Image (cartoon, rainbow, N blue to C red):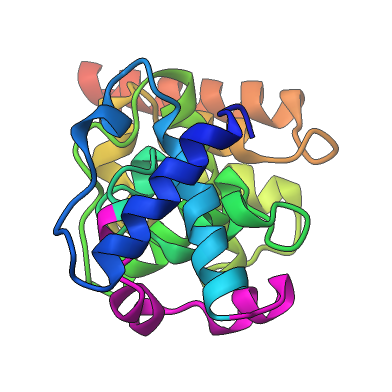
Amino acid sequence: MNCNLSLLSNFIEEYEELLIGKRTDFSQYFFESSVCTQDLVVECIRYACEELLNWTPRQVCSLFHAQTVELMKLQVLIQHINFPFELEKDRNLSYVLHLLYPDLVAFTVKSSVINIYKQILDGKIQFPRNYATGEEGVAKLCICMQYAIEHYHPFSSVKEMYEFFSSMEGVRFMKKYGLFTLMNLLGMDSLSLLHEALPPDQRDNFYFIYYSFQKNYKKQCRMTGKV
């Protein structure tokens, strides 16, 4: 922890007063930009779980749920955690556990993106605004595409994948699995996104160039009326 013990002690003292109803919020001083707010929050949550509830770290990872947050009045703390963009709306408690015990609770961008994408496929949410922009957006979209292929349309060969995503079938796939709009916003097509999404040992430059040529040739023929 980067904050000094005296500061943490004062913060915990105010938390205990909040817990027994002596106060309704923390002093604003703790949430000024010059104060290490997130470190204080994480250590205070650790204190609530390990000292007040007398849980071991592994018990915390197993028993820390929304009911715990409500019982221990932790929501006022959690709202000051800087969540990754894709978790900001739901303030995912697994990320709180990761901050508490990074060796016990792993957190990766990939798992976070897949979690969001599964909720989108289930119709529960839409992609957050500005979710996919720049290089980070391409990386997220690649993760979603990999998931969709693996779970909904596996292929028997790399060649088959390139051929499929160079055709209108690939476009329909992107629309069906909710990736078409983001793909367009990033200025990509289904073939180029596939090429980006494939692991290096499966990425094939020859197929990419060949099917890109075929796709562009057919498009040009349609435009000139030759086909």
Residue 48: % across, % down: 49, 67
In the image, what residue occupies the spot 39% across and 26% down? 188
In the image, what residue occupies the spot 40% across and 18% down? 134
Q: Is residue 163 above or below residue 23?
A: above
Q: Compare residues 184 and 161 and report the one nearer the observer.
A: 184
In the image, what residue occupies the spot 18% across and 65% down? 22
Q: Compare residues 139 and 223 and report the one nearer the observer.
A: 139
65 is within the stretch colored magenta: yes
Residue 165 appears in the rendering: yes
**Count of numbered badges drawn on the protein:** 0
Residue 196: % across, % down: 60, 30
Q: Compare residues 169 and 101 and report the one nearer the observer.
A: 101
Relative side of 193 to 61, left or right: left
Main SS, magenta region, reads helix
The span picked out in magenta is 54-76
223 is within the stretch colored magenta: no
Relative side of 103 to 137, left or right: right
Residue 225 appears in the rendering: no
Relative side of 1 to 116, left or right: right
